[in-house]
Image (cartoon, grey):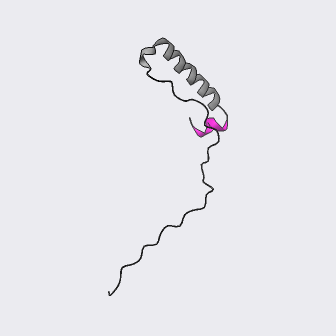
Amino acid sequence: MIPYQRHTEQDLQILRRRHAVYQQARRQHPERWSQETRNLTPAGTVELISCRPKMERPRHQETNQGA
């Protein structure tokens, strides 16, 4: 899935089609499936840029003693 597909809401249709393909494959060849098919439910909201405050990096003490 690419971001454009999510922005234009094409992802829902794509995921529905994928789910149908997986279900059909499972019905035709159940011996190939040891578990359930992939979770193809929409991911919902995804945050690309974090709004959390940045953590300060620890400063390393310089060891230039007696130089």
x 62%, y 32%: residue: 11
Q: In terms of depth relative to the viewer, which is nearer, 26 or 49?
A: 26
Where the C terminus falls, by quadrant?
bottom left
Q: Position of residue 18 (x, y in %)?
A: 56, 24
Q: Position of residue 35 (x, y in %)?
A: 46, 24
x 60%, y 40%: residue: 3
Q: Position of residue 66 (x, y in %)?
A: 32, 87
Q: Is residue 28 above or below residue 63?
A: above
Q: Is residue 32 above or below residue 3?
A: above
x 67%, y 35%: residue: 8
Q: Is residue 36 above or below residue 5?
A: above
Q: Position of residue 58 (x, y in %)?
A: 47, 69
Determine if the magenta segment contains residue 3: yes
Which span is picked out in magenta?
1-9
x 51%, y 28%: residue: 38
Extreme residue in the top direction = 28
Q: Quadrant of residue 64?
A: bottom left
Q: In terms of depth relative to the viewer, which is nearer, 28 or 33?
A: 33
